[in-house]
Image (tube, rainbow, N blue to C red):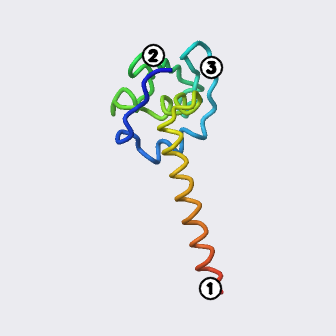
């Protein structure tokens, strides 16, 4: 498996959206990832910055499509970060529901 991304470079919102993308493996480390502006983008995890989406080309760093492919192969760091994000969101939802019940 390719090297994992350094955790500080991961945008939490981008990672959440990446988790919802449809990913299809088309080679050893090559994936078609559902796109928004194109039907799909080809990501090769063995090649840095292989995605040709606007975000990857302009902003640099891991785009949503690369993150989706890395989640698909079970990148441990990303899976851990995503789990923490989901746990935080779940906690926030429970807190909001409890507040509503107290005021109702």
Q: Which residue is mark 1?
A: 102
Q: Quadrant of residue 72?
A: top right
**x%, y% of residue 1?**
51, 20
Q: Check contact, mark 1 vs mark 2: CB within 8 A.
A: no
- x 61%, y 87%: residue: 103
**x%, y% of residue 2?**
46, 21
Residue placed most toward the observer, 89 or 56: 89
Q: Residues within 10 Å of mark 2 (few under 14, many from 20)?
A: few
- x 64%, y 23%: residue: 24
- x 40%, y 32%: residue: 5
Q: Which mark is residue 25?
A: 3
Q: Quadrant of residue 89?
A: bottom right
Q: Secondary structure at mark 2?
A: loop
> Label 1 to label 2, Cα distance in Å?
53 Å
Q: Which residue is mark 2?
A: 46
**x%, y% of residue 78?**
49, 38
């Amino acid at each position: 498996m390719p090297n994992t991304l350094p955790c500080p470079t991961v945008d939490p919102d981008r990672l959440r959206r990446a988790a919802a993308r449809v990913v299809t493996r088309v080679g050893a480390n090559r994936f078609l990832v559902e796109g928004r502006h194109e039907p799909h983008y080809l990501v090769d995890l063995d090649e840095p910055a292989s995605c040709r989406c606007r975000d990857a080309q302009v902003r640099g760093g891991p785009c949503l499509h690369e993150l989706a492919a890395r989640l698909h192969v079970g990148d441990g760091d990303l899976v851990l970060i995503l789990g923490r994000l989901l746990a935080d969101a779940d906690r926030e939802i429970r807190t909001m529901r409890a507040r509503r019940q107290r005021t109702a």
